[in-house]
Structures are given as C-alpha cells and as structure tokens.
Amino acid sequence: MKTYSTAPGSERVKDIVCNICGSALCREYLLIDSARFVKCSRCGLVYQNPQPVFDDLKRRYSEEYFNYERINEKNFFNLMRLGLKDIDFTNLTANIKKTGNTFLDIGCATGMLLESMRKEGWEVKGVEICEGSAGYGRRMRKLDIYTGTLEEANYDNDTFSVVHFSHLIEHLNDPEKFLREVYRILKADGYAVITTPNVNGFQARILRGKWRSAIPDHLYLFSKKTLYSLLKLTGFNILKTVTWGGAAKGLVPGFIKYPVDKMAKSFGFGDVMLVLINKG
C-alpha cells in the first residue's frame, strides 16, 4: 500500500482495503473536508480511504484533545452509564464479578467511568492514547491507566472480566486487529461492550455529510450489519444491541423529537449503537 502526503506538511496517508472482507473495490460515499469516505462494494463497510498513518494520526490526541475530554467528561460519563443501564450491566455481571472483577476501559479519557466502577467494587484499568487525559486520570483519580494503544499495553491472555470501549473503534486504523486483541485478553466468561455511531441510523440517513459523526477523526462508520460481520470474523457472539438518538437537537421541533427518539430506541435506528458481546 502506498504512503503519501495529501499536501506539504500535512499528515501522511495510505490507501487501504476493506477491513472486513479485504476487497479493494469501493465507491465514494462522502467527502468531508479532506476525508474521503468510501463504501465497500462487497460487504458495505464505510471507511476513510486513504487514511492517515498511525504515527501522524496519534498526534491529533494532544493537549487540545485533553481539554475537550476534560470539559465534556461529565456528559460522556452520563451517556456511558445510560448505555450500561440499557443492557442491565449490574445484573448481567453479578455472577462473573464473584469469580473475577477486572474491568478494562479502552479509550478511558480522564477516567470518570473507571472511578465509578472502582467505587462499585471493580478492579479497574484503563488504556488511553492521549497523554494529557491519561495523566489526569492517574494524578487526580489515582487510576491505573496505560498511555498508548491496547496492543502496546500487552496484557496477559484471559485477564479481564469486562472490556469496555465507547466511541473508540471508529477512530482506529485496524479495527479487526484491535478486536482480536480484545478477544485475547477477555476471560472466557467475560463480556465486551462496544459503543459507536450507527451509519444506518435515522440521523445519518437524513443528514448525510452534515451528520455529526461524519468527521475526519472517524476512520470507520459502522452499521449494525458491518459491525456484526467484523465481530463474527474476530470470534465474538453478539448478545444484545441497543440504539438511541432519533433526531438531533434543533433538527426537529421539541414535540416531535421525543417520539422520534423513542421510536429510534424501540426499532433500532438510533444515531448511536451499543453492542454487548462475548467469546464465541
């Protein structure tokens, strides 16, 4: 795969093939600023092509990104807790917590979710590529957070009872490789929880290029179908899926937004999807 720069001094990018089926056949789907999204002609995966190379991509997660995470940490935390409530996380994990209570949050930001889980009796660890965010979690919350990628953390096989990653997988150059690493470190009776935007949701279909998740930082835009395909490819069972977010604030009047949001959740066409999985 060739590596080249889109402009002098900018990030280097490379042409890639589909992360699910390996096909190079694709058609243009969206063009957002400098990011070109394509759709695989074989399996339907939507992804950026070309993509920034990792050594350049990781520079995006600097001090400015930490400030963004710090300012918004409470909102993000509340959304994550609501997602876990939707899958009845406390009751779901009651039995495995008796035999092993290790919880890993990948892309843990400043560690607010980890701090909450620790208070509930979990032994927690985090992985975060942004040094500012990871350092904040270590200093202010006394958390065990590894700065870097999951692969670089190199945890032992079958280490974690729960692996959680919210709004992370769409940022990765190689989601398949990442999920195989999650599989390796997850205990046989454990669970993994994924949250990511839904490219087949109501908002994405209506707004297209103005959809809030169609941004250069997102290298992949999954649908249920393509995420399920990738999960099955990497050995996982899909146990439950929930979605939420039917109409963006300001898109429709308030009296319409509530019923649309309710229908999106009931019928699975929400803006964001959460998928609960375990080892196959």
Image (spheres, rainbow, N blue to C red):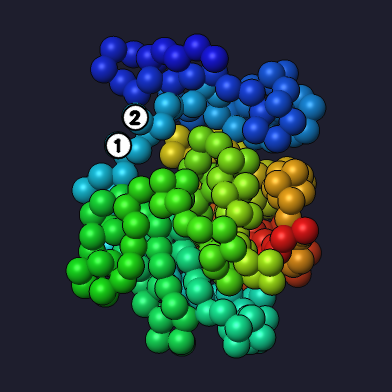
Viewed as shown, does residue 114 lie left or right of 205?
left
Quadrant of the drawing holding the N terminus = top right
Amino acid at the residue labelled 2 = Asp
Q: Is residue 124 left or right of residue 61?
A: right
Q: Determine which residue is flagged by label 1.
A: 59
Residue 194, image x, y percentages: 60, 59
Instruction: Name the quarter where the C terminus is drawn.
Output: bottom right
- Give the secondary structure at mark 1: helix
Between 157 and 113, the residue placed more toward the observer is 157
Horizontally, residue 14 falls left or right of residue 190, namely left
**Residue contact between numbered discs 2 and 1, judged by CB atoms under 8 Å:** yes
Q: Is residue 171 above or below residue 88?
A: above
As displayed, is residue 212 above or below residue 123? above
User: Residue 18 or 270: which is nearer the viewer?
Assistant: 18
Give the side of residue 112 with respect to residue 265, left or right: left
| Other residues around mark 1 within 10 Å, as few (<14) / some (14–19) / many (≥20) | few
- Tell me where residue 14 appears, x and y as whole percent: 49, 19
To which residue does mark 2 refer? 56
Tell which residue pokes out farthest to the front in this image. 156
Q: Nearer the viewer, residue 240 or 186?
A: 186
* Amino acid type of the residue that numbered disc 1 sits on in the rendered structure: Arg
Q: Look at the image and tell me whether residue 191 can be seen.
A: no
